[in-house]
Image (tube, rainbow, N blue to C red):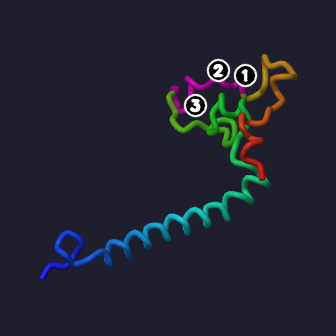
Amino acid sequence: GPAGLFYGGGTTQLVAQVLAALFSIVFTAVMTFIIAFPIHKTMGFRISERQEIAGADVSLHAETAYEFGVGGHGGSFQPMHDLITGKGFTDESKTTQPAAGKESVEA
């Protein structure tokens, strides 16, 4: 007959499933830390504020995700050229600052 928590079969299966789920969560967290910590300490996960404003596609790959201009040249993105090349920025605005709260996550 049916055996389970709601049919008088006990909690054995429920406990096994909860333990398996907890093991999966802990295993995933540990493996994520093993991968993410060296990345955080070497090259980091963040890009500069200027690159964020310009967009990662444009500033890192020199291309746009969607070509809206005539002939596929990203017409609507052309004003961002000044952001990428730094025209109109003072020397102070070209320096990057640490992300807010960075001190709290450094080990």
* Mark drawn on residue 91: none
Question: Looking at the image, which is closer to me, 87 or 51?
Answer: 51
Q: Quick one: label 1 or label 3, which is nearer the N terminus?
A: 3
* Location of residue 28 in the rendering, given as x and y in whole percent from the top left corner: 55, 65
Q: CA distance from mark 2 to mark 1?
A: 6 Å
Q: Amino acid at mark 1?
A: Asp
Q: Which residue is mark 2?
A: 79
Residue 16, given in percent of the width and then of the height, sits at: 38, 76
10 Å crowding of disc 3: few (<14), some (14-19), many (20+):
some
Q: Earlier in the sequence, mark 3 or mark 2?
A: 3
Q: Is residue 31 left or right of residue 9?
A: right
Image height check: is 6 above or below 84? Answer: below
Total marks shown come to 3
Name the residue beneath numbered marker 3.
73
Rendered position, 86 above or below 6:
above
Magenta stretch in the rendered image: 69-83
Q: Residue at x 66, y 29 (%)?
A: 54
